Image (spheres, helix red, strand yellow):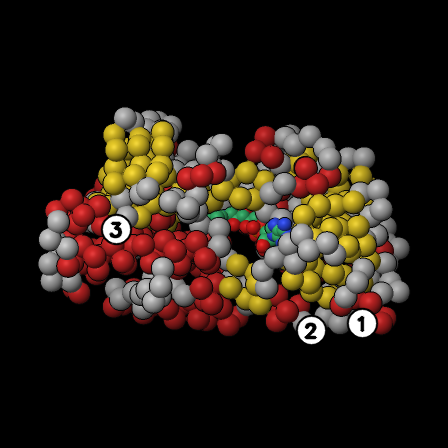
Amino acid sequence: MSGSIERSGNVARRRRVVVVGGGFGGLACASALGNAEVGVTLIDRRNHNLFQPLLYQVATAILSPADISEPLRRTLGRYRNIAIVLAEVSGVDVQHKAVVTSEGMRIEYDVLVLATGSVYNYFGHDEWQPDAPGLKTNREARCIRERLLLGFERAEITLDPVERKRNLTAVVVGGGPTGVEMAGAMAELGAFLIQRDFRNLARDDFRIILLEASSGILAGFDPELARYALERLQTIGVEVRTKTSVEAIEDGVVTAGGERIEAATIVWGAGVRASPVAQWLGIAPGASGRVPVEPDLSVAGLPDIYLIGDAAAARDENGKVLPALAQVAKQQGTYLGKALRAGLEGHATVKPFKFRNRGATAVIGRNAAIFQSSRFRLRGRVAWFLWALIHVYLLVNFEKRLLVSVQWLWTYLTRQRNARVIDDKF
Ligand SMILES: Cc1cc2nc3c(=O)[nH]c(=O)nc-3n(C[C@H](O)[C@H](O)[C@H](O)COP(=O)(O)OP(=O)(O)OC[C@H]3O[C@@H](n4cnc5c(N)ncnc54)[C@H](O)[C@@H]3O)c2cc1C
């Protein structure tokens, strides 16, 4: 490799593990290899680990991007055997065991871990993305936040009723946890801001329309819990339209179920597909572009390449593909890091990966969430409290846990949204 690792002397002489992606899976894997007798290079196209489950709170001005983003160098800097490379990977030269970046850099590996996650699936309509960003990056969350806040500002001063209606309409596509959380948080943002801070707007002027193509929201949840979530959304003013597919999105207009909806804010939350790892490896992908992996998370026929997180289609003991969730990615990363460490240090064979399901949760709004595990079904305030505890616990370090807890406590007590920033130019 050219660059950082060769300069760091002792690292280059050891076996080289290259980890692509510093998200939930990649960071856990690299951390588990910290100070091991192996040289690790972690490559990511951004310089931070991002806690995606709370991006919707950045989009609705509860949190700031830095509250949920942690520099990778900060987290991993204490391990002298880990080098970090800020670069976009564009392919893998499997034959010569090298990762290739978009700027033409080649980084050689003995063992490769791909943890590049997923991207939003626009089902063949990537041209909808600029109008309807998803919630995968801070940039997208800030873009949505600005469109929402700018909508209020423009509606406050316009005399044109059509323009006013457009500015006060938000459409969320997808009735999964992301869509539900986003719609709920937008409703609460609108209710508080409009009532308190605007003079020419009424609370009911702000419309949030949640579109779901199937017959119900929150498909993976117990039907009772999904029904509770639906009722809560409707109570706080969200119009939920099921069996309604999006036909087109263009110039701020969503066409769905034959109706044209003009909206200043459109959010896409309708399913993900894996990053293009299958293409890089020259193998056929499974459903949603995910690559099937062996029980030890290696790729069949490519024993030095491992895949974890959203990009991997790992199966549980019943043969069911594990969901694309942070807890799966994190557990796989820790497992693989420890397994590689044991293998490289010459220890005994490691057992296959086993996912421990800690339960699923989604929040609808203040004091309203759902939680389900193999043993419990919870809803309302208790589930909301549990949701908050789980998310604080999952944050990357103590500082973030403290920061986010304080912000949440403040928001809970005052209903204020402190991160209401509209940049000069947009
Ligand atoms: C809005 C939202 C809410 C969610 N809520 C929950 C939740 O409540 N609970 C839950 O369990 N899961 C949730 N998830 C899912 C969870 O975030 C993912 O399952 C998890 O992030 C997957 O981890 P990963 O390591 O596979 O990928 P990621 O965490 O996405 O990390 C991938 C990393 O790879 C990097 N990368 C990608 N491509 C390249 C490239 N070509 N070159 C270099 N670097 C690259 C990215 O920059 C990123 O840092 C949510 C996801 C979203 C989007």
Circle 1 Cα neighbour tier, 10 Å, few/some/many (<14 / 14–19 / ≥20): some
Q: Residue at x 57, y 63 (%)?
A: 48
Q: How far across and down, in percent of the image, does residue 19 sit? A: 71, 55
Q: How far across and down, in percent of the image, does residue 389 sit? A: 44, 59
Location of mark 2 (residue): 78
Q: Residue at x 25, y 30 (%)?
A: 259
User: What kind of element bears circle 2?
Assistant: loop
Alpha carbons under labels 2 and 1: distance apart: 14 Å
Location of mark 3 (residue): 187
Q: How far across and down, in percent of the image, does residue 120 sit? A: 49, 42
Label tally: 3
Location of mark 1 (residue): 8
Q: Residue at x 70, y 59 (%)?
A: 42
Residue type, numbered disc 3: Ala
Alpha carbons under labels 2 and 3: distance apart: 42 Å
Residue type, numbered disc 2: Arg
